[in-house]
Image (cartoon, grey):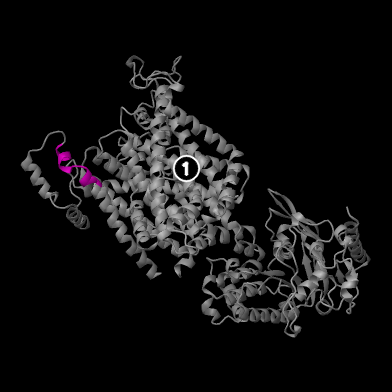
Amino acid sequence: MGRHVLRRLLQMIPVFLGTTFLIFFMVYALGDPVAALFGDKAPDPATAARIRQELYLDEPLWRQYVHYMGQVFSGHFGTAFDGRPVTELMADAFPVTLRLTLVAVLFETALGLTLGVATGLRRGRALDTSVLLLTLVVVSVPTFVSGSVLQYLIGVKWGWTTPSVAPEAPLGQLLLPGVVLGLVSLAYTTRLTRTSLVENARADYVRTAVAKGLPRRRVIVRHLLRNSLIPVVTFLGTDLGALMGGAIVTERIFNIHGVGYQLYQGILRQNSPTVVGFVTILVIVFLLANLLVDLLYAVLDPRIRYA
Amino acid sequence: MSRADRDAEQDAGQDAEQRAGQDAEGPPAVPRLLEVRDLRVEFRTRDGVTEAVSGVSYGVDAGRTLAVLGESGSGKSVTAQAVMGILDSPPARVTGGRILFRGRDLLRMGEDERRRVRGARMAMIFQDALSALNPVLSVGAQLAEMYEVHQGLSRRAARARAVELMDRVRIPAARERAGDYPHQFSGGMRQRIMIAMALALEPDLIIADEPTTALDVTVQAQVMDLLAELRREYAMGLILITHDLGVVADVADTIAVMYAGRIVETAPVRDLYRRPAHPYTRGLLDSVPRLDGGGRELYAIKGLPPGPADLPPGCPFAPRCPRAQDVCRAERPPLYEVACGDASVRRASACHFWKDELDARDPIAAP
Amino acid sequence: MPEPYDSPPAPAPPGGGGPGGGAPALAAADPTAAAAPAAVPAGRRGGGRAPGRGRAAGPAAAPRGLWSDAWRDLRRNPVFVASALIILFLVLIAVWPQLITDGNPYRGDLAKAQDGPAPGHPFGYDLQGRDVYTRTVYGARASITVGICATAGAALLGSVLGGLAGYYGGWWDALLSRIADVFFGIPILLGGLVFLSVVTSGSVWPVVGFIVLLGWPQISRIARGAVLTAKRHDYVQAARALGASDARTLLRHIAPNAVAPVIVVATIALGTYIALEATLSFLGVGLKPPTVSWGIDISSASTQIRNAPHMLLWPAGALSVTVLAFIMLGDAVRDALDPKLR
């Protein structure tokens, strides 16, 4: 187990470096942070040169990157467009997005598992076929479409909830956005659960469990589900990381002041420290989620734990 | 319907009537431990319906061993799964016959009652223990589960019984290893765990489906010996499904040879080895290398067994049979009663020429 | 929507690759514009097996039989026929929008802004009083162009790189896997925002380029796995033993067997790429006016949804049907090409 953890950690390092460098490269090399700083006005050359030096922009790209990463690890992410430190924005934004993501993951877990198990145990029946078709439809409707439509129907037309979320983002107002955010993942969770269940239902050890004279319920819960849910649990874990980065659209539609909102503002105003800072953190979150899932996988499946 | 079919049916029918008559007259001697009568199993797939088991009858008594011999696809495993009630259905379906366990028809039991018989009074040992054991539960937990479910023992007490059981099948350091997972054991040890699981509740009947096929040759004998020893000790009935004649000779009392979903010969083990009454049995025997066989070339049955879809109209073995006549190709032979040394055992052969076969001294193997 | 060519949950340790092993496969797939839905969950499950190691070769063992069998199955599959017809229609109007409309997507009459349906204008008018029907028809061109070009690029790049990595193995394979991990580590929507926000052109090509850039690793994993499996086949070993050149072995023996999984994943990816383009355009970093795009129209309509829902519903419906058609096509093709799932 210890070796497994260590190996995963070591493998993560090059990926982390490569990914953050790629983001850094896109923002700093392809864009012009100084010009962006001044907006439409042409900066006076002396000032521009000074800023360049301050930001290490006159040095080779890899030096800039090393410098930036050094700052990141000491907790300096630079200043946002409104003069506040980026870290302050993060402190405001991340809890909101985390809450939103948790709502989404809870929603997709509860409903996805239920639907997946219900269809997987009744393969080929009407319920199964219609749920399968429905998941395809759900996957096909992009989040910004389903978000706008649901916002209109539930928030405006029927007035069950507020169409937009207050800046402090209370949990009650996050229910609808959470559902919207988790909708596509819900389809995946359902399909994955179903497939995994169907695959495992034919496994020899399930037949053994039946031959042992166990009640059907125990065969399903303790033997079939226990094995089938391993991939689902790992999917949900990674999804937590993925959804945080994918919340931009949902946050934009419902005007939620989370990570996606700040990121979007940063991009609109071409504020590189905000963009790179937030994206770096999101990549770290994403990679950590993957790492945790790998470890979780080892906990759930002894074959990996003792490999 | 061919005459042969009718005969076979009458044969089965009479048999059933006789038994029924006995039942009516009063308590029969003692019902056999297990008696399968005219069992039929179908597979319904998208491509059509095929019959995997076509009217199989066999039985086993307490303390005795029945070996069911046959190539893969002969229906021997499907029959066993039907007895255990663990057929994959769909696609499989029992379409006829009776499975009497201590005189009670398992096929007429309710699901719950049947479940209580499974595992507790009859148990099964599978071929590939690695895939038959749950990969994510410790072996101790999988063994203890039997006691928890069937006897309502506490987790702790059940666990203690599980360790005893592992000791019983001679797994070294049982207490320490009870927390290990199946993939951490060697093939032989895993099969011992399967045996322990089957023995847990001291069932009356154990069905072992090729229990040693997946093992190394050296380990095969150990596992087989263990199984035979435990069967004697607990006085259980054992149905041993195998394609390995060598294993059978040592442990079995009677043998049923299956071919294409049917029984082609049943006999006490000695009679069958000395004087087979079916050309297929003889072919099997002659294809086993023997130390006393001199320089004789090994016999190989020519051709392949027919699939359930392309069965010939007559005897299913006819296309491969050196003895086949026109009648064999036209009429399906019923199970003929064959006289045998032991009056208490019924011997039968599904060959029109069983008498000739019985009298034939020479190996059929043509030069 | 199990990734068809994923290996069964096996005792194989997770992590065909880096920390991102398989998991980041979905990284690429953000929930909005999930890249390749099929591949995603399976890629993730197990937290990291490279998708596509296990069964790829099974169905492809006999190429000719496989393809003709698959075709026979497909023709009889109503889902396939329906989605193929829809796609055919979409491609037609993408090339010749004049076939079904004689309007001009740019001409607006502010007096009619946000008006509902009128004779000759069944979908109503948008904010600038332009005909929604005409714009919806013309919007197909951008979506289809992005979808097809991005998929073609990603499939070509991915299968060449992945195929070579699988065939030659060694350091090149290891390096490529790490590079793919890096790309998987970037959530695709974030990457799109960052990358495209510095691009000023509003045409389809930067979007296509970006999708190819982040999309190829997914295809390359599938291709690598498929080639690895095909390589193990006896007849391939035999061909190599008989002295067939690498190029010949790859093209004659391996490629025909490895191409099926790539086609399946690419078809499904096509649908999700279209959704991705629309999402990026919705966020204002993808296509920009004057390009006519469903994403842009939905974006401008979403603020007006209370007054004029028709402005949003028609392009949104067209977009969803298009994505659905490609995903269902991919699903049907997968079922046909993978007999084990029957």
- Is residue A27 inside the magenta stretch? yes
Seen in the picture, residue B307 relative to A159 is either above or below; the reply is below
Question: At 88% across and 70% down in the image, what residue appears?
Answer: B354
Rendered image quadrant of residue B252? bottom right
Residue C330 highlighted magenta (yes or no): no
Give the structural element (helix, strand or loop) at label 1: helix
Dot 1, crowdedness within 10 Å: few (<14), some or many (≥20)? many
Given residues B183 and A60, the one toward you in this image is A60
- Stretch of the chain drawn in magenta: A26-38
Q: Is residue B224 above or below residue C267?
A: below
Please give left or right for residue B277 compared with residue C199 in the image: right
Q: Chain of mark 1?
A: C
In the foreground, B42 or B121: B42
Outermost residue toward the front? C243
Name the chief secondary structure element in magenta.
helix
Q: Is residue A146 visible?
A: yes
Q: Is residue C10 left or right of residue B209?
A: left
Q: Residue at x 88, y 75 (%)?
A: B358
Q: How many marks?
A: 1
Instruction: Indicate whether C79 appears above or below A65.
Output: above
Which residue has dot 1 on it? C267
Above or below, B117 relative to A140: below
Q: Residue at x 17, y 46 (%)?
A: A79
Question: Mark 1 belongs to which amino acid?
Answer: Thr
Q: x, y (%) of residue C340? A: 58, 53
Q: Position of residue A50 (x, y in %)?
A: 8, 46
The spot of residue B123 in percent (x, y) is: 69, 69
Q: Nearer the viewer, residue B340 or C44?
A: B340
Residue A277, percent from left and from top: 24, 49
